[in-house]
Each structure stands twice: as C-alpha cells, then as structure tokens.
Image (cartoon, grey):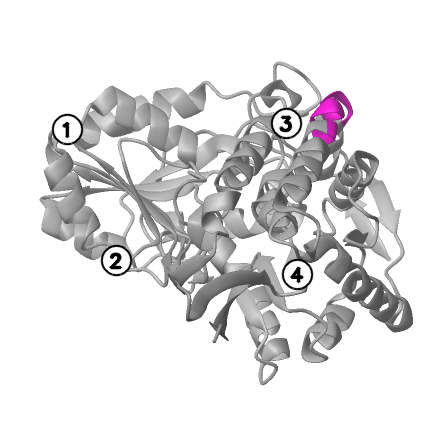
Amino acid sequence: MIRCVSPIDGSVYAERPTLSSKDANAAVARAKAAQPEWAVRTLEERIALVQAGVAKVGAMNDEIVPELAHQMGRPIRYGGEFGGFNERASYMAGIAKEALADIVIEDSDAFRRVIKRVPHGVVLVVAPWNYPYMTAINTVAPALISGNSVILKHASQTPLVGERMAQAFHAAGVPEDVFQNVFLDHQTTSDLIAAKSFGFVNFTGSVGGGQAIEQAAAGTFTGVGLELGGKDPGYVCDDADLDAAVDTLIDGAMFNAGQCCCGIERIYVAEQHFDAFVEKAVAIVSGYKLGNPLNPATTLGPMAHKRFADEVRQQTAEAVGAGAKAHIATSPQDDGGAYLTPQILTNVTHDMRVMRDESFGPVVGIMPVKDDAEAIRLMNDSHFGLTASVWTGDVTRAEAIADQIETGTVFMNRADYLDPGLCWTGCKDTGRGGGLSLIGYHNLTRPKSYHLKKA
C-alpha cells in the first residue's frame, strides 16, 4: 500500500494499493502493444494531444493547489506549478519538429541516405514529490511527442499527481494504454527494469534510488537518465549587485522549504561583502511566516515529511556543535516534526556535513572567500554537480569562472531555475543524462540509419 502522510497534521491523506507483479507486467504489455499505433500518428497530432492534456491539467489547478499543500506542504499562496509545467511542455512541443527532424545525408538518383530519430518504445518515468508536476512533465511531454508510450510511477508522497495527469491526458484524447499512471513498490519496479520491460528509464530522486535503478538495469542495455542529489553553490563576487544577490540566493535556499532540486545549499561571498550579505540574509529569513500551508499568510510550509526535517535538524545541530553560528531563533511553529525553522549558518567549514551532504531543507551555510580561485575550489569541493550561481557584473568573468566549475548548469545573476531551452543535466553523484532542450529529445529516441540504393 502506498500511503501519503500529510505534513500538515500527520494524518494519512491518501493511500493506494500497489500493483501485483502480474498486474504490473500486464500494464507494460498494454503499453508495448499500444505504442506502435501511437508512433505512426503524425507528429502534429501527438503534439496537439499532449498540449490538450497540459491544458486540462491547468483547468484543474484550483483543485490541485490545495492537494499539493496536503501532500507535500507547499503554501497555497504560491499557486501551484502550472506556470512552469506549461512553459516546459510548450517549449518542448515548439521544438519537436526541429529536434526530431531527419538528417538527410544524400537524396540523389542513386541513393537516399538518412538518419531518423525513432522512439525507444516504452519509457518509464519515476518522478519525485518536491515539484511533482514540473519534474514529471520534463520527460512525459517529449516522450509522448516523440512516439513513446509512457508509464508514470510517482513518489508515494504525491500519489494524486500521477492520477491527475493521467485523467487530464486521457480526457484530451491520449489513449489510456499509451499513458499509464501506476503504483509500484520498489522491488516490482526493479524487477520490471531487470526484465527489459522499458526502452528508457528516467529517474529523479536520491543517489541511493539512482544506484538501485542502475543496478536493476545492469546488463539489460536499457537507457537510463538520472537526476539525483545536489549541493548547489552560489558565489557572490566583489562586483556583484549585493541586494539582488542576497534576495535571489536566499529565496533559492528557502523556497519550498528548501526542497528544490537546484536549490542553493551553500553560499560563498567576497570577504568585503560578507557581513553585509549575512545581515541582509538574516533580515529576509526572519520575515518568513512558518505555518499551515493552507493559510494564505504562510510563506514557509512544513517539510514534506518529519524524517526530512530531522535530517536537516541533525546536520544543523552537528554544525553548531562544531562551532557554526545559527542566526535564526527557533520559530514558535517549529514543532520538532515536519515544521522546521529556516536557518542561516556562518562559521561553517567543509568539514561539516551541512556543507557536504545534501540537506534538501531550509538551511544554508555562508562562507567568506578572498578571490575567485578560492570560490572555485570550494564550489568544486562536492560530490554533487547540478547547478551553480555566479554573481558579477562581468559576463566574461562569469563565463571564465563557469568554465572551471564542475556542474551541469551555471547561472549568472540568477538561481534556482530550469530553462527548457538548455539541457538539464548533472555530473558526479548528481547523475547522468540530459532532459529538456534538443538533447532531451535525443535521449528519448534512438538514431536509426537508412541506406537506400535506388538503382
């Protein structure tokens, strides 16, 4: 049984039975049988149906927003995820013709030689709870548009999301067997992957989860895309716009209770700006209103589960015990459970877990640095590599720094954003592969060469 325990009050908000092995295999069989007919539909028809499904998700937004608050704790004041959900799907729909276009090498009287992009077949999407609609659509939309059938397995914390998406896409005309939402336990998921049930698997989640996916796929030659952990840094150079930097970086560290894939988890500030940066950061965080996410006045909701909050508390306590300074007094709403006081730490070092391990919560450590070289060394001193944020008025300097950072994406003067026109990718323990952009389509298809002799 999949159970969603609401972070609002600890009650069971939703529960769903998992599929048996027999029923799971039957779902895969239906997806495989339906995929060829879906793939021979015109690209324009597939695009139109996916866009119609996206629109129907938007029509449900008034119901979706409080559901998300109940499932994972995001305050209703932020209005859900449809803006980003629609932006990403619309962008991928708009570039599909170019991304999937044939590469014609020769079309003469003698030969037609061409490389086509063809679907893998069945794509399994294993989506996370923190941005459950936006992370799912990153793969669902281009996978369907490129002619694959899709099986969506959503996180147990957000079980209603997959149901909502399936309901919307089916109502729009996408065949039920082409896009299926399923509830699977970990072992059944691994067994399906090991049995070569899928042509491609996309997983967003923990490093341990990614390792389990790779182990299940070992020897099957199944394509795997993994976006795992992060410990994303921000660097405030000596010529940065300090107000803009602190506003954006602290928001990037604290929004969604710090539960963002590309959230800022550590900040390095040119030493002449360090005190001013910390003062401004403390003022911002002190103004947050921690509380019930169903209250429109709440700006910071609970973390999605008590165990996630406990990990952040432990990292913070260890750091303070080792000499770090905590700047935010414990909030009266901090119940020792899922509701957690946001925290800013100084006097931190990379010997502390809070500066090494993924926190995925509302805590950020801030360190002074003397120059770009020290900042680059510290930014690279991590097992993870998803994004990094550099703050400077000099684009040449920013790009020179970016060239030396071991990460998937580098931002200048912004943070905590996903640009659908750029490849969403990571390195080191953050994983492998690439979503969105032209490259996202290339990962969800395979090249097929045609060498046709005419005479």
x%, y% of residue 151? Answer: 73, 57
Q: Which residue is mark 4?
A: 123
Is residue 194 toward the left or the right of residue 427 in the image? right
Q: Residue furthest toward the top?
A: 297
Q: Which mark is residue 393?
A: 1
Looking at marks 4 and 1 on the same chain, the residue that comes earlier in the sequence is marked by 4
Label 4 sits on a secondary structure element that is strand
Name the residue: 42% across, 36% down.
417
Q: Residue at x 41, y 37 (%)?
A: 416
Membership of 60 in magenta stretch:
yes
Residue ID for mark 3: 80
Mark sitting earlier along the chain (4/2): 4
Give residue 49's position: percent from left, percent from top. Answer: 71, 38
In the image, residue 329 above or below residue 433: above
Q: Which residues are magenta?
A: 56-63
Q: Amino acid at mark 3?
A: Gly
Marks 4 and 2, how far apart in space? 33 Å
- Element on which disc 1 rests: loop
Disc 2 versus disc 3: nearer the observer: 3
Residue kind at label 1, given as amino acid type: Gly
Q: Secondary structure at mark 2?
A: helix
For label 3, the SS is loop
